[in-house]
Amino acid sequence: MTTSLIDTHVHINFDTFKEDIEAVRQRWIESGVEHLIHSCVEPSEFQSIQALAHRFPEVFFAVGLHPLDVDQWTADMGEEICRLAQSDAKVVAIGETGLDFYKADDRDRQVAAFRAQLAIAHQLDLPVIIHCRDAAAEMAQILQEFWQQQGPVKGVMHCWGGTPEETQWFLDLGLYISFSGTVTFKKATQIQDSARLVPGDRLLVETDCPFLAPVPQRGKRNEPAFVRHVAAQVAQLRETSLEAIAAQTSQNARCLFKLPVAVTQ
């Protein structure tokens, strides 16, 4: 029997999957991926992601605006995200949202859009999927202020690439930490150190496909079936079995995203 896994961050609505999505699905089923969380880059994607979630019972999804797209942000978009999140029971999170100071310098707009989406997640009691790149200190400060002023929000630092010290900041705020294919990269020593540090009950795995395919698939289009390589590397780093990591991360994903225990394929 194949070990069951949950891929907590995918983008399978992208055009790169358009021609062979059924074959991609067959491979994730054969690899034991029992649920997928489809992230959202911008609300205009909602319909295409929703269609996939209704086509494939194992797919659940989020709605939000990515920090590299905040030039689109308006107060009306905040209302739209809130409305869309309440329009479908398969929406299980807000995001992905967050801060990316690596590729963009519109910091004030990013912060404003992120704060607004945190407020929506808090209002709807949904977890938030957080993208954070070269912005850990600012992110931790914003979250701490929000927690103090409005209360905590559940969520995950997705595709985590920070130092162990930064990892601890977000653990202290009650967040989950999700590792992607980057944890398999030879030079990603600080990510690997973080993967050893995270308590078992806060650990998640993902592909972030079609990006960042893990070793031994590096350089190829990433896909949900490859989450098994991520889990195997995390298991090796933590000196435990793939089965133990799969069971723990699946339990954590079900807890965070309120997923059903099983789904009929």
Image (tube, helix red, strand yellow):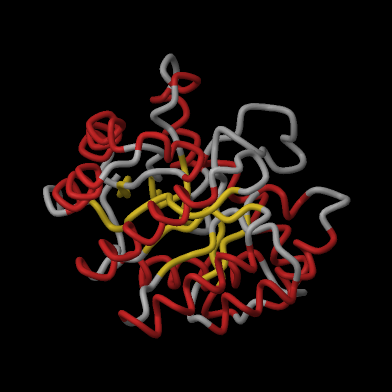
**On screen, residue 128 above or below 175:** above
Residue 200 falls in which quadrant of the image? bottom right
Front-lying residue, 214 or 31: 214
Left of 257 or right of it: where is 197?
Answer: right
Left of 38 or right of it: where is 83?
Answer: left
Front-lying residue, 128 or 189: 128
> Which residue appears at 26% of the width and 50% of the height?
264
> Residue 98, image x and y in percent?
48, 55
Q: Is residue 59 visible?
A: yes
> Which residue appears at 41% of the width and 18% of the height?
18
Q: Quadrant of the C terminus?
A: top left
> Which residue appears at 57% of the width and 79% of the height?
171
> Residue 169, image x and y in percent?
62, 78
Residue lying furthest top in this view?
Answer: 19
Left of 181 or right of it: where is 78?
Answer: left
> Which residue appears at 34% of the width and 41% of the height?
73
Front-lying residue, 69 or 9: 69
Residue lying furthest front in this view?
Answer: 108
Left of 115 or right of it: where is 102?
Answer: right
Front-lying residue, 140 or 217: 140
Q: Is residue 35 visible?
A: no
> Residue 232, image x and y in percent?
69, 58
> Residue 206, image x and y in percent?
55, 52
